[in-house]
Image (spheres, rainbow, N blue to C red):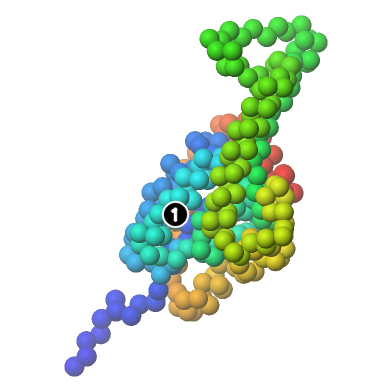
């Protein structure tokens, strides 16, 4: 007599991690390691997933948070011997592409925005404005470079050179991450690391993504029509859902809007 055991021969399960939003610490971004660490850990460790899929829609943000999240995903993928797929929605640019490169294979829509492999620092200069309005800036430091890049003082060439050097170091780390992830798939003749971005179709030709495709059909093609999906993503409180416009950080909202706007979104 053959026993029927419903838990045997079940369809494979794929964990889906939703990485949607800007990348920054605390309330300034939707994606950061503090928020996503427990979700990523559960995605890899709960049961035995056949794969982990990253659903990515991000214009970028903090290189540190991008690096920490990507490193966590790669560590767990190696520990659990689980393949990782990334699926780009509207955009995976800058830090968003850094996250995508944590996957073994990357897919995008033909009209997705992909790339922007670079580092940017943005500020403003208001020294002439405050001088015109009779405002005097008073700053006292115990280090000659402590107030570098002060937007209320005239720009200093040494400060600019210093911040560009720091950006250059970060850029090299980003480039190394992409090269390590993509290997020989990258077009050796293309200028991929100058901060440009492309549509998904062009990104495929350049080797930045592996194919054109969407999460559900690609995963079903890989693991069968009966594949099960387990979704992992942060839950927003009722206050954040309905009161963000009133209680949120206005400056953070402006910064986030500027990041998306760079890609026409």
Residue 185 in view here? yes
Task: Name above or below for residue 90 compared with residue 119.
Answer: below
The residue positioned farthest toward the front in the image shown? 188
Q: Position of residue 30 (x, y in %)?
A: 53, 43
Horizontal placement of 132 versus 175: left or right? right
Nearer to me, 131 or 150:
150
Query: Where in the figure is residue 231, as x and y percent of width and height?
Result: 45, 60
Residue at figure coordinates x 56%, y 10% from the top left: 141
**Residue under the image location 47 percent in, 48 percent down:** 69
Q: Residue furthest left?
A: 1
Residue 153: image x %, image y %? 71, 15
Residue at the image position 63 percent from the left and 38 percent from the top: 168
Residue 55 visible at all: no
Answer with the quarter of the image where residue 215 lies: bottom right
Classify 70 as above or below 224: above
Q: Which residue is mark 1?
A: 73
Measuring from the top left, give residue 140's x and y in whole percent.
Answer: 58, 7
Place residue 89 in its image quadrant: bottom right
């Amino acid at each position: 007599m053959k026993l029927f055991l419903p838990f045997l021969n079940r369809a494979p399960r794929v964990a889906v991690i939703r990485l949607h939003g800007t990348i920054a610490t605390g309330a300034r971004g939707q994606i950061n390691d503090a928020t996503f660490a427990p979700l990523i850990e559960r995605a890899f460790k709960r049961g035995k997933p056949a794969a982990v899929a990253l659903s990515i829609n991000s214009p970028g943000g903090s290189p540190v948070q991008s690096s920490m999240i990507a490193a966590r995903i790669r560590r767990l993928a190696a520990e659990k011997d689980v393949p990782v797929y990334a699926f780009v929605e509207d955009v995976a640019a800058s830090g968003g592409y850094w996250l995508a490169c944590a996957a073994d294979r990357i897919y995008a829509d033909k009209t997705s925005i992909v790339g922007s492999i670079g580092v940017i620092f943005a500020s403003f200069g208001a020294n002439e404005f405050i001088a015109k309005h009779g405002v005097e800036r008073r700053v006292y430091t115990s280090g000659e470079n402590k107030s570098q890049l002060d937007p209320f003082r005239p720009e200093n060439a040494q400060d600019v050179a210093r911040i560009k050097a720091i950006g250059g170091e970060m850029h090299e780390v980003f480039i190394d991450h992409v090269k390590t992830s993509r290997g020989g798939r990258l077009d050796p003749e293309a200028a991929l690391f100058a901060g440009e971005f492309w549509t998904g179709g062009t990104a495929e030709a350049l080797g930045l993504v592996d194919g054109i495709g969407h999460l559900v059909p690609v995963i079903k093609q890989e693991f069968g029509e009966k594949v099960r999906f387990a979704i992992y993503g942060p839950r927003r409180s009722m206050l954040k859902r309905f009161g963000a416009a009133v209680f949120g950080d206005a400056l953070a909202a402006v910064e986030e809007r500027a990041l998306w706007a760079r890609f026409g979104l």
